[in-house]
Image (spheres, grey):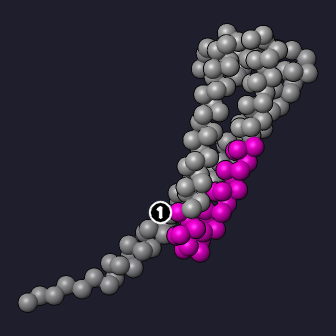
Amino acid sequence: MDKTTLVKQYYKNLVDSLELAEKILVILDGARQSSMKLDYISLDQENQNLLSSSAKLEEFHKQRRQIAEHLGCTGERFTKEVLDKVSGNAKQTLSQTSEKLQKALSDCQAKLESQADLLLEQQNVLHEASQTLRVEVNA
């Protein structure tokens, strides 16, 4: 494949990844709402959606890495290497889309951490409540 085709594939993958990251943000919002309502059936569904979406996002990342390798970019920061191989509008477009994806992924991570904190808080509340109900019988 020629360089232009590979760069187009790389860009499409970035766009698909960005759309999926934005979908994950919506899923995380739904999971938080389900947690707040203690609706664990809905929370379980949101978690299943999150798992499948995260797996797809990981697959997109692997595909981007493979495309980058075909372009001769094999380093850990292969996105920067890809950007260094293009110029003009292509470079600007790839750079902007990469930055948007990076921000969306950072937002996902922050929401996941917040969700974990909420679940831990709920677990602590339930643990404390159950401890107050513990009755020991001395016979």
Quadrant where the image shows the N terminus: top right
Q: Kindly state the secondary structure of the residue where label 1 is placed.
A: helix
Relative height, residue 30 to residue 52 (above, below): below
Say whether residue 36 is magenta.
Answer: yes
Q: Is there any visible trace of residue 35 in the rendered image?
A: no
Relative height, residue 105 to residue 121 (above, below): above
Quadrant where the image shows the C terminus: bottom left
Relative height, residue 1 to residue 20 (above, below): above
Q: Which residues are magenta?
A: 19-44
Say whether residue 5 is magenta.
Answer: no
Residue under label 1: 120
* Residue 40, x across and y down, in percent: 52, 70
The residue carrying pointer 1 sits among few (fewer than 14), some (14 to 19) or many (20 or more) residues within 10 Å by Cα, namely few
Q: Main secondary structure of the magenta part?
A: helix
* Residue 94, x across and y down, in percent: 81, 26
Task: Report the side of 2 relative to 136 (left or right).
Answer: right
- Residue shown at 80%/33% (left/top)? 97
Q: Is there any visible trace of residue 139 in the rendered image?
A: yes
* Residue 102, x across and y down, in percent: 71, 36
Task: Report the side of 43 relative to 81 (left or right).
Answer: left
Task: Report the side of 124 relative to 28 (left or right).
Answer: left
Q: Quadrant of residue 61?
A: top right
Nearer-the-camera pick, 18 or 53: 53
- Residue shown at 61%/15% (left/top)? 75
- Residue shown at 53%/69% (left/top)? 41
- Residue shown at 38%/72% (left/top)? 127
